[in-house]
Image: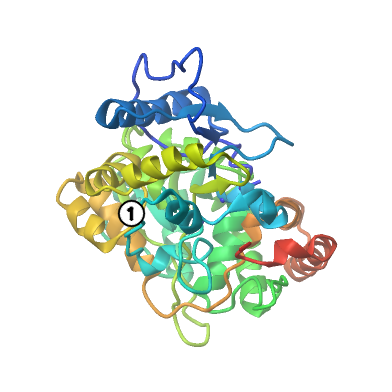
């Protein structure tokens, strides 16, 4: 669903529990103390620090949090969003595979990753090169109270984009100035709409190709929704999510993990459903994509640091911590066992979100793994062109042709970016 991205405003939607003292780092770190780099806002930095503090208390080991600064070499461990993946793809020698670090440190890496999480974090032999810590997939969130007000069944969400237009018309008639919005436009409406339609946004060689008929029809449909004021765009990142939390917008497509952030939404009774699909495409509905913050290992660190970092990775993979990550932070479980265990501990909204996410991910996927949203330059171009269609009336075909042409120029100038897997 990864710069890695959208520049996510460089704020990863992690929701770790806050601890008043956890963010304090040791005055003088030990020589073998590994670093964990991130680019979180102050609140999420403190929440991540709480996980690190729990690790220290339970194991007696420590890990030091540092901030990612542009141009810096990677830290021992690096928590990267999908919008930061260009750094990994374009500078592969700055990173080492996770399985390699764990093997050299003598720490077992015994995890059977869920199939939906493997693209982008496993190599050709199925070995983990990074840890998909908090992955998610786009889903449709809706305000059941808004549906009731519009005379719609609050327990039945639209399955297709065609059905959704009828919902939006009734929501507008019921007084909603923002019937529908979306966070992460490229991730949702390019990468995932393409995947669900069975026409991936990139080909097997890593070139962009999201200017086909299904994508053009979808973007053009969104343009008509904009003119009819069914759809409102608020930015390239997660700006729209706050509008849904405020009760201004009745529906939103965004990352499934955001259900945790919508718990305190004002006047919103939360509903969640799989991402809608176009029922007139060949082959029917295909799976959506999973993506999100992942943990990468920086190259060139002392062996002692890697041994400590490997112990922290093992801690994150422990059954209890996996379940806690899902229960509290909204991500997809890393294993099927964690998925089953999590369902018994999730509140109703969490179970619905997890079920909707997995429903979106069902089916036979295409093989293309490179996502437009993972290549910063291509994503920025695609965002600009989508906005030109939705705000100024530029023809959808012309906009997508331009986005593909300009984006492929970016990829051509940096060939390493075409590789979905850097190792």
Please tell me which residue lies in front, 395 or 137: 137
- Point 30% across, 60% down: residue: 335
Say which quarter of the image contains residue 385: bottom right
- Point 78% across, 60% down: residue: 394
- Give the x, y percent position of residue 36: 51, 34
Please tell me which residue lies in front, 218 or 46: 46
Q: Furthest residue to the left?
A: 344
- Point 61% across, 77% down: residue: 214
- Point 47% across, 77% down: residue: 365
Figure check: 342 above or below 267: below
Please tell me which residue lies in front, 192 or 374: 374
Q: SS class of the residue under badge 1?
A: strand
Crowding at mark 1 (Cα within 10 Å: few <14, some 14-19, many 20+)? many
Q: On the image, numbered disc 1 is attached to which residue? A: 272
- Give the x, y percent position of residue 64: 48, 27
- Give the x, y percent position of residue 307: 44, 42
Please tell me which residue lies in front, 412 or 256: 412
Q: Is residue 280 visible?
A: yes
Q: How many badges with numbers are in the image?
A: 1
């Amino acid at each position: 669903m990864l710069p890695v991205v959208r520049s996510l405003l460089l704020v990863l939607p992690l929701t770790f529990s806050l601890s008043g003292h956890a963010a304090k780092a040791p005055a003088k770190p030990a020589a073998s103390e590994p670093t964990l780099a991130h680019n979180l806002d102050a609140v999420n930095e403190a929440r991540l620090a709480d996980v690190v503090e729990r690790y220290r208390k339970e194991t007696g080991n420590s890990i030091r949090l540092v901030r990612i600064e542009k141009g810096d070499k990677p830290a021992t461990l690096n928590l990267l969003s999908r919008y930061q993946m260009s750094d990994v793809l374009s500078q592969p020698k700055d990173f080492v595979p996770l399985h390699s670090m764990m093997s050299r440190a003598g720490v077992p890496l015994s995890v059977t990753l869920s199939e939906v999480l493997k693209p982008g974090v496993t190599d050709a032999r199925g070995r983990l090169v990074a840890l998909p810590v908090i992955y998610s997939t786009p889903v449709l969130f809706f305000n059941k109270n808004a549906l009731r007000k519009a005379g719609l069944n609050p327990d039945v969400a639209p399955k297709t984009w065609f059905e959704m237009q009828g919902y939006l018309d009734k929501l507008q008639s019921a007084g909603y100035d923002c019937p529908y919005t979306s966070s992460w436009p490229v991730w949702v409406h390019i990468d995932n709409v393409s995947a669900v339609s069975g026409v991936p946004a990139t080909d097997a060689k890593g070139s962009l190709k999201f200017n086909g008929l299904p994508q053009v029809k979808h973007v053009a449909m969104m343009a008509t929704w904009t003119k009819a004021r069914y759809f409102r765009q608020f930015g390239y990142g997660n700006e729209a999510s706050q509008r849904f939390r405020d009760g201004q917008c009745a529906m939103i497509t965004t990352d499934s993990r955001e259900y945790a952030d919508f718990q305190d939404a004002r006047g919103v009774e939360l509903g969640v459903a799989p991402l809608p699909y176009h029922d007139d495409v060949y082959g029917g509905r295909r799976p959506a994509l999973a993506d999100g913050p992942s943990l990468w290992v920086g190259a060139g660190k002392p062996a002692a640091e890697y041994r400590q970092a490997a112990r922290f990775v093992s801690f994150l993979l422990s059954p209890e911590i996996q379940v806690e990550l899902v229960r509290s932070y909204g991500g997809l479980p890393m294993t099927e066992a964690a998925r089953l265990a999590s369902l018994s501990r999730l509140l109703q909204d969490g179970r619905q979100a997890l079920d909707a996410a997995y429903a979106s991910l069902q089916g036979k996927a295409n093989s293309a793994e490179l996502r437009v949203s993972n290549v910063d330059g291509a994503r920025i171009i695609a965002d600009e062109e989508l906005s030109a269609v939705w705000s100024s009336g530029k023809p959808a075909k012309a906009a997508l042709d331009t986005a593909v042409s300009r984006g492929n120029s970016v990829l051509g100038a940096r060939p390493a970016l075409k590789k979905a897997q850097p190792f």
